[in-house]
Amino acid sequence: MSNILQLEKVSFSYGNSDILKDISLSVEKGDFVGLIGPNGSGKTTLLKILLGILTPRKGSVYLFEKDLKRFNNWGKIGYVPQKATNIEKNFPATVYEIVSMGLLSSKKLPKIFTKQDDIKIKNALSVVKMEKCSQKRITELSGGQQQRVLIAKALVTEPEILILDEPTTGVDQENQKSFYDLLGKLNKEGMTIILVSHDIGRITRYVTKIASINQTLNFYGTHKEFCSKDLAHKHEHKLCLDKG
């Protein structure tokens, strides 16, 4: 399988504070990676490096086998940031308009939407089963529904990898399960996914690999391999009980 993503001895610091040290891992096409670790462990920082928002102090990052410094095809990457559903209650945009925003970065001025764009938007909403809500205001929806819309926004460019940072924060338990079921379905259909989550017990029902970081990479491998190591006992023991 080809590598979608590769990190080689990546380190990052804020001033004199080391956040990440010598992180090396690769993500192959079709992987569903659960990225876990305590608060302040560097998970969000790592995602920002992958997205080109932050530059590592040392090390190399490759996306689709191209050095990140020369990578410019960002439509291949869909991103749902942390706290993305913290939307002002009077925000006037409709569901359709929110999803259309995912296409703006790929458009030249003037940013005019085409019939093909309309098809992409409707297809993305159909994937997350929100097409019937396209003309509703985003603020009329539940937290779980809003999160589906934000996934549609990330999917509208037809990416090859989907990156999500704590996507179920503020979403109730029932909608969390539905949300993870959707991610599992997308992965089975071929989408490569990297998911940051504190919901360790639940995500292990869906992920194919676990990356445990706390400044350094403590573990990277399958759920079964993780549970066979002493490292598993440093996390919730439920992690090794929930997956059949």
Image (cartoon, rainbow, N blue to C red):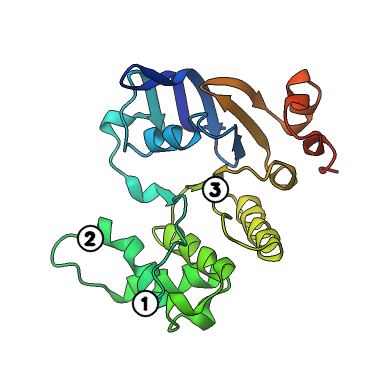
The residue nearer to you, when weighing 76 against 79, is: 79
Where in the figure is residue 100, as x and y percent of width and height?
35, 69
- Is label 3 in a helix, a strand or a loop? loop
- Is label 2 in a helix, a strand or a loop? loop
Q: Mark 2 Cα within 10 Å, few/some/many (few <14, many 20+)?
A: few
Whole-angstrom CA distance, mark 2 to mark 3, is: 28 Å
Circle 2 is placed at which residue position? 107
Whole-angstrom CA distance, mark 1 to mark 3, is: 24 Å
The dot on residue 90 is: 1
- Quadrant for the N terminus in the image: top right
Circle 3 is placed at which residue position? 166
For the point 41% across and 66% down, the residue is 87
In the rendered image, the vertical position of residue 135 relative to residue 74, given as above or below = below
CB under 8 Å between discs 1 and 2: no
Location of residue 157 (image quadrant): bottom left
Asked whether, in this view, residue 212 is left or right of residue 51, the answer is: right
Single out the mark in the foreground, 2 or 3: 3
In the rendered image, the vertical position of residue 203 relative to residue 218, given as above or below = below
Where in the figure is residue 40, as x and y percent of width and height?
50, 31
Location of residue 209 (image quadrant): top right
Where in the figure is residue 138, as x and y percent of width and height?
44, 75
Q: What residue type is labelled 3?
A: Glu
Location of residue 9 (image quadrant): top left
Q: Mark 1 Cα within 10 Å, few/some/many (few <14, many 20+)?
A: few
- Is label 1 in a helix, a strand or a loop? loop
